[in-house]
Structure formats: structure tokens, C-alpha cells
Image: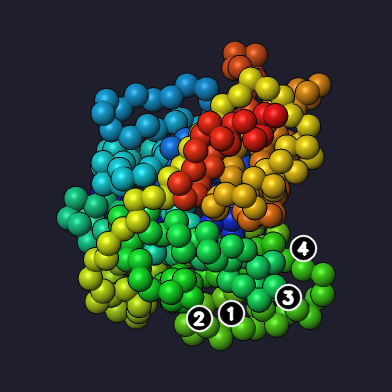
Amino acid sequence: MHKIPVTVVTGFLGSGKTTLVRHLLQNNQGRRIAVLVNEFGEVGIDGELLRSCQVCNDEETPNGSGPNIVELANGCLCCTVQEEFFPTMQELLKRRDEIDCIVIETSGLALPKPLVQAFHWPEIRTGATVDGVVTVVDGDALAQGRIVNNLDALHTQRQADDSLEHETPIEELFEDQLACADMVLLAKTDVIQEEDTCSRIQQWLQQQTSTGVKVVPCHHGQISPDILLGFNAAVEDNLDSRPSHHDQEEEHDHDDNINSICIELEQTFDPNTLIERLQVLVQQQEIYRIKGFVAVPNKAMRLVLHGVGQRFDQFYDRLWQTSEPRLTQLVFIGQGLDSHHITEAISA
């Protein structure tokens, strides 16, 4: 039987991976796409964003003790995956006749190469191949002289993930993501004020990648599926040409003090007031990432909120459904976080 082509989308947290995948689902041009979302946190906020991308049914498909697979209205599938990659792939391969391709959105902490190496497993290799690796880069961060908007946050979060090596500098993780890429998408170029700055960043990235790898500007994840899919690279068969700083490293100790908490409130919030409170809270505590949904008074639509450091992005994604409670639900990722203190600070 045919092998399902798999596209791996990698990049740091906040770089724009979920926005890219949402646009792909909304503009799939008839392709039946299975999406695997691998994220850090107790609540599947990113997975919920994908499920609410206006192409989804409300009904979820039960899979026993296996991964939760959500049917999309256009024939696509969505899976929220954390440590369930192998059973998820097994479930999807059972349905290979219903799937044209698979897109895996890695967490902002993940190296692409270990994931690609998993496609050597006999149970997966016979049914799927890594069609290509796409690395999403935050152009706004690079314009400010950083590779990610909050390096300290990313470095500390990596220490909480047992699947990663943790002593290598963040810069080397960035190099690994570029070294494994078949294409680099330069996101958030629309917020860069000077056009020559964008050109310099693109030229610099081109120098950091392998020969033939293209660096493509991408606004709000809007890129044609014909460009994003169909590399036919069989990446798992040529990993030697994609070196990683982590190839020979041993395991390291992990910091168990990193945690994520979810706050659910029946309270509604003015977005500007809430963001001001969150910005104060970020200064007071070791909070590295905030993401979730906000109930806004006198608004029929749900507000999506993302925060990294002092930077917060917001947009309304859909109408509240009549069958769901209008709750404010926020996930905080950081160090030594206390849910009671955070709840008091934002609901005062």
C-alpha cells in the first residue's frame, strides 16, 4: 500500500506554527489532511484552536484508550498528541485510505531530527514517510536581534521535557531546526517596519541553511499548500545530511519545578484591562507563556489570547456556541506557579 507523506512543522514557541496549520486546513484544496499537534501544557489550547478553525464538526471519534481523533468537516482529522506519537500514528495508518497527508506540528521545545528518526520504526516505516520538514522562524524576533521573543522562557521550558537534551544552548537548537529544514518560513514580517531589515534577515537565514533550501516570507500563515506540501524528500533516509548538535549527547537531569496551570473563570474581562493585569503578573512571577480563551462582556465571539513575555496578541476566532459555557480559560506555563495567587491577581 502507498506510504502517507508526512510534513513536520517545527519552530520556537510563538513563531506562528499553529497559524500556519490553521490556514492550511482552511485552504486544503480538497486534500484530506491529518494534523498532529504536540504541545506543552495541561489543556489543549493549540489543539482547540485547530478544531475551531471553522472546518470542524462537533463530534469526536472515540478510539478506546488511544489518542483522541477529531473529525473535520472536510474529511481531515485532528489529533492532540503529547507522549502518544506511536499509538497515534498506528491509528492513522489504519485509515490510510482516508488520508492524503499528515502534518505534525511539534512543540516549541522539540528538535525535528528525533521525530524523523522515529519513522525508521518498522511499524511506521511501511506506512508513512517524512515528505519534508518546514521550520517557522519569527521574523520580528530576529529583527530585534533575538532568535525568539523570550529566550529565557524557551530555555527553561526545555528543561521540563524529558524527551529533549537540555544542556545545549538555545542557539544550537535553532541551528538544528534550520539544519533539518527543507524550507524555512519567515513569519511575522508584516510587523517589521523597515523593508531592508526584512531583506537582510532573509539573506542571513539563507546563509544558515543547506544549499537549495528556500527561505520564504509568510504573512499570517498564508501560503499555498502546493508550496508547503509535496517535497518528496524521504527525510528519514537522508538524515546524515542534516547534522544535529544533539546527535552524540547523553541524557541530562531535569528541573521538576517547571509547571503549567489552567485557570477557569466564569468572569468576563475587558481585553485591555486583562492584558494590563497579565503584564504586571509576568513581571512579578516566572511566567513564560500565557495562552487561552477570554469571555468578553457584550461580545458574542470568543477572544483568543497569546502572551510571550510582555507581548500579547489577541483575536476573535468564532462565536460562542449555545451549548458551551462562556468561560475565561487561560493556561500559564512557568516556574513554581501558584494557581490561587494567579487567579486572585487577574480576577481582582
Check disc 2: other Cα within 10 Å, few if <14, some if 14-19, many if 20+: many
241 in relation to 342, above or below:
below
Amino acid on which the number 2 mark rests in the picture: Thr
Amino acid on which the number 1 mark rests in the picture: Leu
Q: Position of residue 181 (x, y in %)?
A: 46, 71
- Image depth: mark 4 or mark 1 in front: 4
Which residue, given by chain and number where applicable, does mark 2 sit on? 209
**Which mark, by number, is residue 191?**
4
Do the numbered discs 2 and 3 sit on residues whose CB atoms are within 8 Å?
Answer: no
Q: Position of residue 228 (x, y in %)?
A: 54, 60
Do the numbered discs 4 and 2 sit on residues whose CB atoms are within 8 Å?
Answer: no
Q: Position of residue 100 (x, y in %)?
A: 43, 47
Amino acid on which the number 3 mark rests in the picture: Cys
Check disc 4: other Cα within 10 Å, few if <14, some if 14-19, many if 20+: few
Name the image quarter holding residue 143.
bottom right
Label 3 vs 1, first from the N-terminus: 3
Check disc 1: other Cα within 10 Å, few if <14, some if 14-19, many if 20+: some
Q: Secondary structure at mark 3?
A: helix
**Which mark, by number, is residue 198?**
3
Side of 108 where 1 appears, left or right? left
Which residue, given by chain and number where applicable, does mark 1 sit on? 205
**Which mark, by number, is residue 65?**
none
Q: Secondary structure at mark 2?
A: loop
Report, in whole angstroms, how far the alpha carbon at label 2 lies from the one at label 1: 7 Å
Amino acid on which the number 4 mark rests in the picture: Val
Report, in whole angstroms, how far the alpha carbon at label 3 lies from the one at label 4: 10 Å
Do the numbered discs 3 and 1 sit on residues whose CB atoms are within 8 Å?
Answer: no
Q: Residue at x 19, y 50 (%)?
A: 123
